[in-house]
Image (spheres, rainbow, N blue to C red):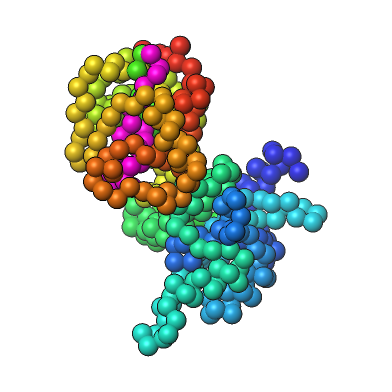
Amino acid sequence: MSFVEKVRLLDYWKIQDAALQTEFPRSRLVLMVDKRLLVTKDTPEVKLVEHSYDHLKQLLGEYGLQFDLSTSCLLDALPGDNDMIPLFGTSVEAADPPEDSPISKKDVLRQLGNSLGGRFTDIRMAMLTMQEERQRNLLAKFQTLTKWSATYRRCPKCAAALKMRISKSGAECVTCQKVYYPTFSPVSITLIIDPTHENALLVRHRGSAGGVFTAVAGFAHSGESMAECARREIAEEVGIEVESIQSLDMSQPWPMPDSSLMIAHVAVAKMDQKISVCPDELETAQWFSRNQVRQALETTLSDPFLKNLPKTLDDRQTLTYIPPAGAIAHQMIRKWVDGKIDVLHSSRI
């Protein structure tokens, strides 16, 4: 099946509840339990674990868990034996064991993960450590549609009930017939470099893991272009002005805490400007040389799960890591370290 045929089939399934309902028993599914994702274990790369409908129903049933269309959302179309079959994400909640039980819920989930051929992990860590873009995007879609469909129950216009599509791709008001679709917010994320291209300004967010520095990011406001958003966020967060901004032609869906689309830029700013961080957003912002950032990159690649985070206050403010490989900030910073960002034709703003 061609890409065009696949896209049109997905579009058909999204809006035709009866057709998608018929396909559900022969679908494949990925799973979240208590908002923790089932991923592969004992493998070099973190990936989603897929199961057939019948197999997952049987294994979950052994633990007293059930899933159905109400807890599931359409993610993709996969090649089957003769035609395409749906890939769903399904999210269930496990009951807490009795207080006098010798087995904790954590133990139960560990056993369930083993039975399903994987392990359960935090959604954020899965996004940060998945190597494949498709895997990250499927997870972002899974989390976004699950959360959106649980939130949109009433029509914002007339307050009547909404009828959710089985695919979770939209919801129609039963009274005024207005259709609502999953929302996301555009976010600019910008790597700031100096005119020589040999230094980068990185920031540490309040409450973030110690020693992890990243690029400046923020939500776009109504009436802004993404370049204008990037310029404003830099001024707000670190108190400097940039000479030019350029799109890096990179983006990433990011589902936490709510659905957003990270859009990458690079900006040039002079190093002699005084940095003034926004205390509500950041702990610190500092200029680093390419070699300093390269060392942090190498540390991150050798410790992708950030197991050796610094503990002391002083060490927390020292550049030790950049975000793991699954984050668009990692990809931007790595391209700059490797000399693969060309800003010769930056547009002035």
**Residue in the picture at 36% in, 21% down:** 199
Residue 218: horizontal and vertical position, in percent?
Answer: 32, 35
Of 188 and 343, nearer the camera is 343
Residue 204 on the magenta segment: yes
Instruction: Name the spot of residue 57 as percent of width and height, x first.
Output: 62, 72
Residue 57 covered by magenta stretch: no
Q: Is residue 340 above or below residue 119?
A: above
User: Would you identify the image quadrant in which residue 293 lies?
Assistant: top left
Compared to 342, does 89 lie above or below? below
Vertical arrangement, residue 155 with respect to residue 319, above or below: below
Quarter containing the N terminus: top right
Mark yes or no: residue 7 visible: yes
Which quadrant would the C terminus be assigned to in this image? Answer: top left
Q: Nearer the viewer, residue 189 or 320?
A: 320
- Which stretch is magenta? 196-215
Q: Position of residue 285 (x, y in %)?
A: 27, 32
The answer to whether 148 appears left or right of 31 in the picture is: left
124 w.r.t. 193: above or below: below
Q: Residue at x 44, y 66 (%)?
A: 34
Q: Which residue is outermost to the bottom?
A: 100
Q: Residue at x 71, y 42 (%)?
A: 5
Whether residue 182 is visible here, answered yes or no, is no
Residue 186: give x, y in percent of width and height: 40, 36
Magenta region, main secondary structure: loop
